[in-house]
Amino acid sequence: MRVLIFGEDGQLGKSLKDLQPTEMEVFYSGRSDLDLSDLKKLEAFLNSLKPQMVLNASAYTSVDGAETEVDLAHTINCEAPATMAKYVRSENAKILHISTDYVFDGCKQTAYLPDDEKNPKSEYGKSKLAGETALLKYTPKNSMIIRTSWLFSEYGSNFVKTILDLMSKRTEISVVSDQTGSPTYARALAEAVWLILIGNRFKPGIYHWTNSGKTTWFDFANLIKKLGARKGLISRPATILPVSSQDFKTKAVRPVFSVLDSQRLIELIDHQPSNWEASLEEMLERLRSRTQPDILSKNAKT
């Protein structure tokens, strides 16, 4: 099976590449290859490569940026997936699309099920929901949507790496303490994706996948601090102060509660996600082995 993965430069794209099975013919596309806002070039690219499986791990992911770059976010998060879906329909191919917890409003107090009511409160969430809707409109029988949340990894920019970086620059860090979710290691999500593809477990529909357990950003940051110091990634731990969402102003509204129920996908691939704390420790160990000299030198300069 010929697989085309969009989002080569992102956290999930790099994690997928790390775990890529040798028996599959896989092509990757990143920002240097293709601008997903150029829909005509995207269409031509798909028709030239003729993949049997399209895996869309790419997105406009600046949650606050989407509040001002509304059209660009909509093009990349909705119109680009719609173009992929039209190709899938014309070629009888398949598409696996990664989406987000931001399609929900965060008002629920129990884990969101895939079929729960969607009510995004941010332009980012609206654009991602529009992308889901496009897939279900153009190729519902050949589309598989996986929502995830609070993605982190040793790659790119994410909450874990931001906290580690701030620890080297500040004596105090304020972190939101009233938003709850499930941190998800990109490598764990990549494992689930490959289990779907190599296990011939593609089944149309909407699914969720996160690491198990839940926490707040504040508690997440404190564990990053604790484990980071233990692994030598932090030389001078800063004090972490809890702050409310109301006092920590951002352009976009974040869901207060965004825990996702992964049971549907657990049953499909017969695989249990690991706890987020264990995945965080695993990620930090990989980061330590790759970048410890750089991080320690950065800490030494401040």
Image (spheres, rainbow, N blue to C red):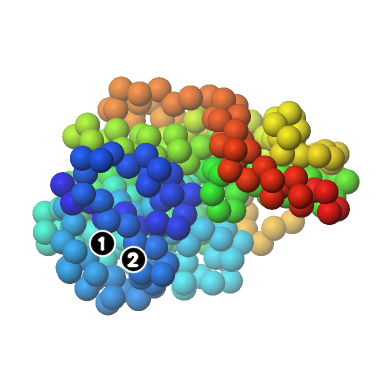
Amino acid bearing label 2: Ala
Q: Is residue 214 above or below residue 81?
A: above
Q: Position of residue 160 (x, y in %)?
A: 64, 43
Residue drawn at x 46%, y 72% is: 72
Give the left or right position of residue 90, taking residue 71 as reference.
left
Q: Position of residue 190 (x, y in %)?
A: 39, 40
Residue drawn at x 25%, y 51% is: 26
Amino acid bearing label 1: Met
Q: Quadrant of residue 279?
A: top right
Give the left or right position of residue 205, taking residue 17 as reference.
left
Label 1 sits on residue: 84
Q: Quick one: label 2, few (<14), some, or many (20+) residues within 10 Å?
A: many
Say whether residue 183 is visible.
Answer: no
Q: Is residue 302 above or below residue 164?
A: below
Q: Quadrant of residue 164?
A: top right
Along the line of sight, which residue is nearer the eye, 273 or 262?
A: 273
- Rendered image: mark on residue 80: 2
Along the line of sight, which residue is nearer the eye, 70 or 190?
A: 190
- Rendered image: mark on residue 254: none
Residue drawn at x 35%, y 76% is: 38
Q: Are marks 2 and 1 in contact (CB under 8 Å)?
A: yes
Q: Position of residue 56 (x, y in %)?
A: 34, 54
Q: Element under label 2?
A: helix
Give the left or right position of residue 118, taking residue 133 as reference.
right
Along the line of sight, which residue is nearer the eye, 256 or 57?
A: 57
